[in-house]
Amino acid sequence: MNRLSLKIKLTLLYTFFMVLATCAVLAILFSLSNREILASVQSKLERRVQDSSDDITLRDGELRLDSDFYSVTQDVYLSLYDEDMYFLYGRVPYGFDVQPEIADGRTRRIPEGDTDWYVYDMSFRLAEDYTVYVRGITSVTDAEESFNVTVRFAVILFPLMALVTALIGYRMTRRTLLPVKKITATVQKIRADADLSRRIGLGGEGKKDRGGKNRDEIYGLAGTFDDMLEELETAFKREKQFTSDVSHELRTPVSVILAQCSECLEDGELTGRQREQILLIERKARDMAGMISQLLFLSRADQGRQPLHREWVNVSELTQMTVEEQQLLADAGGNGVQISCRAGDDIMACVDETLFIRLLDNLISNAVSYGRKNGRVEVSLLRGQGEIIGTVSDDGSGISEEDLPHIWERFYRADASRAGGSHSGLGLSMVKWIAEAHGGCVEVQSTPGKGSVFTFRFPAEEKQIKNKN
Ligand code: ADP
């Protein structure tokens, strides 16, 4: 039942209640009609038999019957019997072939063939020692039966009625729930494309009350959703603009700090402690400059202003060069990591050179930072079918299953204590954006305690190349 759609559930629900209500009404009507028919047959039968006393007389010991006794009035047949149940006079209806015992003053129902016969006997004492019995016999007339027939007809039509109700109900429910379907589809599209500019667009439809508000709650809900999306979009735009503005504003003071640090460090009169302090300031300012540049990159990407200048470049050479640079940095870091590179010969791809290097830089520096001391980092690049496939693997601590889906989120850091201060949790967001902006993708496989493998794929087809800005 839980798997059924709301449309089906609602249709089943009210069809069920409709069937229940109709069954109850029909049962009541049927029992009332039966009782009514019986009462009317009984009263006419008894009246006719009682009235027949005027037609029977005993004169000079001889039984005389008026001609009215023979006539069939109101469908009631009269017959006369003596005390031994011997038929004397009268008429018995065609089809009534039984001769039931006398039951004085009691109406009985006797089914015979297709007909339900009603029989009423009454004794008449004509003399001291002479009693006769008048028997009235009738059946239900067409008029009396007609109501019953109507009810029976309704019972036969009932399944059809239920089917038609279910069909009409289903159509109506579907129409009513159409806006819900549209709301769901729009929200799914917003989630899939991260595009807050989409609207459901049903707020203007539906009947309005005098105040201009939607009378239909679901259309009203769609309108409210659109208003909410509007506000969300504005808030997001404001937030992106804020990030971009702040990053811009911070760039100059950080550059000034860095410039001043270099100048101070040239001063030969600095004490050892002062030099150390200035070097620390310089290092932190560099971290800050790196973070600002990442923030600027991502806010430009969000606003669709991050340029992508693609050209055919030898990505094998780029990879080799980046690995060599990263090896120098790792050596300077002093944790003894060895980076090896296996790149196919002269693989050409149409990429933005700066962004491609940035992607590799991020992946390799992560592998070094989160790798084992004196461990190994392997970088490979090869040409697949219509794509280039690159991997960066390390033999570090790996990423836990809970953290794995979140590492691409901004500012997410699985274990903030493990990497140095230069790590802000923005690197992989940038890597993902760069891969996707090139029409490619990036994924990770990681075994806690054994290491991680990051794989990126870029299309290598010429027709897929489109430069942004
Ligand atoms: P950060 O600046 O903190 O490195 P990233 O976005 O580059 O930010 O990475 C997000 C998080 O993913 C990191 O904080 C780290 O916990 C995890 N991570 C990234 N690369 C690796 C790796 N090679 N091995 C283990 N964990 C990693």
Image (cartoon, rainbow, N blue to C red):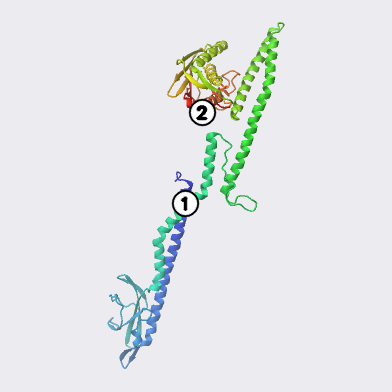
Query: Who comes first in sequence, dot 2 or dot 1?
Result: 1
- Front position in the image: 270 or 225: 225
Q: Left or right: where does residue 212 sit relative to residue 330?
A: right
Q: Left or right: where does residue 86 sit relative to residue 347?
A: left
Outermost residue, bottom direction? Answer: 60
Q: Left or right: where does residue 222 sit relative to residue 93?
A: right
Q: Secondary structure at mark 1?
A: helix
Residue that appears at 65% across and 17% down: 285
- From what the image shows, is residue 102 above or below residue 212? below
Q: Amino acid at mark 1?
A: Tyr
Outermost residue, top direction? Answer: 268
Whether residue 449 appears in this view of the structure is no
- From what the image shows, is residue 300 above or below residue 52? above
- From what the image shows, is residue 277 above or below residue 66? above
Residue that appears at 39% across and 84% down: 51
> Mark 1 highlights which residue?
170
> Depth-wise, is mark 2 or mark 1 nearer the camera?
1
Whether residue 382 appears in this view of the structure is yes
Hey, which quadrant is residue 297 in on the image? top right
Q: Amino acid at mark 2?
A: Pro
Hey, which quadrant is residue 333 in on the image? top right
Image location (x, y in percent) of residue 164: 44, 56
> Mark 2 highlights which residue?
405
Hey, which quadrant is residue 159 in on the image? bottom left
- The quadrant of the picture showing ligand 1 is top right
Q: CA distance from mark 2 to mark 1?
A: 41 Å
* Image quarter (top left, top right, bottom left or bottom right) of the C terminus: top right
Are dots 2 and 1 in contact, CB under 8 Å? no
Image location (x, y in percent) of residue 278: 68, 12
